[in-house]
Image: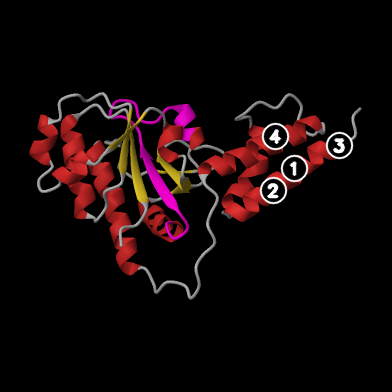
């Protein structure tokens, strides 16, 4: 069975990297990947490196935004060395293990920045957690295709080491879109109630309040219950 693990490449620039990444994914039994606004037109060099992985190369989906690429994902980890308050920083081995664990509840994703500048600040904020390879300070950056291989390998290892499945089916996890709806509605309720003042999307107050809910791995049923409760609060709140 193919795990629902997705590799998302933001603005890939180099055709050779795409070919090598396709081969790396197939080496590890993976094939779901998305290119967000790729800057590569000629894939001829990619085909030279995608040895026996031309099907994976041709199967790459295109997306216009990161939101589009991860809309159905239940967990999204970005590859970045930056430290962001409220987001965990996981080593690749832990990422592989958690990807396999969470994949039992829905599609999960690893996001890679472009070869020149990596992920933008907004893209880092959009990811649920972060991961970086503990490289030597003399040469901290890793080639994109090598990074894809490294994380794909960790997924492969975690898959092979996975224990027997639980006796019963796990509940369906809330998607990224559903989590965003809960966070947005929570912000509206707390702002109208006076707890948050002029809170804007992405501000620290709302993000910190919602972080425990995101870490709790809300199920789809729980997310809908939260939304129903907050809609009822808004509806029944006495007008001032």
Residue linked to disc 1: 230
Left or right, residue 217 beside residue 193: left
Instruction: Give the crowd class for mark 1: few <14, some 14-19, many >=20 residues within 10 Å.
Output: some
Which residue is at a point 64% across and 54% down the rendered structure image? 222
Residue 126 among those drawn in magenta? no
Which residue is at a point 42% across and 27% down the rendered structure image? 120
Which residue is at a point 90% across and 34% down the rendered structure image? 238
- Give the vertical position of 115 relative to 55 (above or below): above
- Distance of label 3 from label 4 (alpha carbons): 15 Å
Stretch in magenta: 103-124
Q: Which mark is residue 187?
A: 4
Rendered location of residue 187, percent (x, y): 70, 34
Rendered location of residue 7, percent (x, y): 33, 43
Task: Check whether the beta carbons of the residues at disc 1 and disc 2 lie within 8 A of each other.
Answer: yes
Rendered location of residue 43, percent (x, y): 15, 30
Of pointers 2 and 3, the one earlier in the residue sequence: 2
Instruction: Give the crowd class for mark 3: few <14, some 14-19, many >=20 residues within 10 Å.
Output: few
Q: Check the image and tell me how it is coloured.
A: secondary structure
Task: Check whether the beta carbons of the residues at disc 1 and disc 4 lie within 8 A of each other.
Answer: no
- Distance of label 4 from label 2 (alpha carbons): 13 Å
Task: Check whether the beta carbons of the residues at disc 3 and disc 4 lie within 8 A of each other.
Answer: no
- Give the vertical position of 116 relative to 100 (above or below): above
SS type, badge 4: helix
SS type, badge 3: loop
Rendered location of residue 125, percent (x, y): 51, 34
Of circles 1 and 4, which is in front?
Answer: 1
- Give the vertical position of 132 relative to 205 (above or below): below
Residue linked to disc 2: 226
Residue linked to disc 3: 237
Instruction: Give the crowd class for mark 2: few <14, some 14-19, many >=20 residues within 10 Å.
Output: some
Of pointers 3 and 1, the one earlier in the residue sequence: 1
């Amino acid at each position: 069975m193919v795990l629902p693990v997705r590799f998302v490449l933001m603005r890939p620039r180099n055709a050779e990297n795409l070919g090598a990444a396709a081969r790396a994914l197939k080496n590890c039994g993976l094939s779901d990947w998305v290119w967000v606004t790729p800057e590569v037109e000629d894939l001829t060099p990619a085909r030279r490196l995608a040895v026996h992985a031309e099907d994976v190369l041709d199967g790459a989906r295109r997306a216009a935004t990161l939101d589009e690429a991860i809309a159905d994902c239940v967990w999204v980890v970005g590859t970045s060395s930056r430290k962001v308050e409220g987001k965990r920083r996981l080593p690749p081995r832990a990422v592989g293990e958690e990807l396999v664990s969470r994949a039992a509840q829905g599609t999960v994703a690893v996001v890679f920045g472009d070869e020149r500048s990596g992920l933008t600040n907004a893209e880092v904020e959009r990811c649920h957690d972060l991961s970086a390879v503990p490289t030597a300070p003399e040469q901290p950056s890793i080639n994109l295709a090598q990074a894809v291989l490294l994380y794909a390998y960790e997924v492969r290892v975690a898959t092979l080491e996975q224990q027997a499945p639980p006796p019963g089916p796990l509940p369906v996890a809330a998607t990224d879109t559903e989590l965003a709806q809960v966070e947005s509605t929570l912000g509206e309720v707390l702002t109208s109630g006076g707890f948050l003042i002029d809170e804007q999307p992405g501000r620290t107050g709302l993000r910190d309040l919602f972080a425990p809910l995101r870490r709790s791995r809300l199920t789809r049923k729980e997310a809908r219950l939260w939304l129903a409760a907050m809609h009822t609060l808004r509806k029944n709140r006495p007008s001032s």
